[in-house]
Amino acid sequence: LQSTNEELETTNEELQSTNEELETMNEELQSTNEELETINDELRTRTLELDQANAFLETILASMGVAVVVLDGSQTVRVWNRHAEELWGVRPEEALGQHFLSLDIGLPMEELRACVRGALAGEEGGMIVVDANDRRGRALRCRVTALPLTVGRDEVSGVILLMERTGAEAPAASA
């Protein structure tokens, strides 16, 4: 009985030690969980702020009254506003992520290539007027202004294109 009692006491001590370790692990997990909840709350707040900033930006772009397209440094479409959709007949989800100069939207892309590259090189306010076709195939004159999209003072990260019909219509193609 004495031997069994000693074994039971040893087992009891081991169980108490294991219980203490489990309690410590539980406290650590609770602390980690609280930290994760704090991080999640912060992430929710930041996501809400980002959504509000995006909505504000979309409102500004829609209010400009011209087609606005933003390209990144590799000339991939990152922003395509409602006026660009109306003018060229391409929905944002079709344009976003596409290389701008490969889009078939009725603009003479070869004529725009130098203007876009100039803006990427940091040249201010490249502008060109081109003959184009709108989404219905109608001829039009379009003024395209290419502005460098800068980060900080000097680093060009992309191009902002402003496109609008001019008062004069493009001449009809002769048959």
Image (cartoon, rainbow, N blue to C red):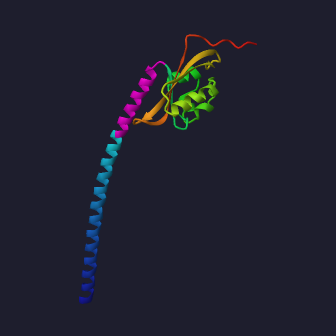
Whether residue 91 is visible, yes or no, is: yes
**With respect to residue 168, does 59 lie above or below?**
below
The residue sitting at 63% across, 32% down in the picture is: 102
Specify the segment rendered in magenta: 46-65
Observer-nearest of 155 and 9: 155
Q: Whole-percent x and y of residue 39? A: 33, 48
Closest to the observer, 6 or 146: 146
Q: Main secondary structure of the magenta part?
A: helix
Which image quadrant is residue 5 in? bottom left
Q: Residue at x 34, y 46 (%)?
A: 40
Residue 78 showing in the rendered view: no
Taking depth in this image into account, of 122 and 29 the one nearest to the observer is 122
Q: Residue at x 37, y 39 (%)?
A: 47
The x and y percentages for residue 106 are 63, 23
Q: Nearer the viewer, residue 47 or 147?
A: 147
Q: Is residue 76 left or right of residue 45?
A: right
Point 59% across, 35% down: residue: 99
Q: Is residue 143 left or right of residue 4?
A: right
| Residue situated furthest bottom in the rendering | 2
Query: Would you place residue 99 above or below residue 134 in this image?
Result: below
Please say whether residue 85 is one of the residues in the magenta stretch: no
Q: Which image quarter holds the C terminus?
A: top right
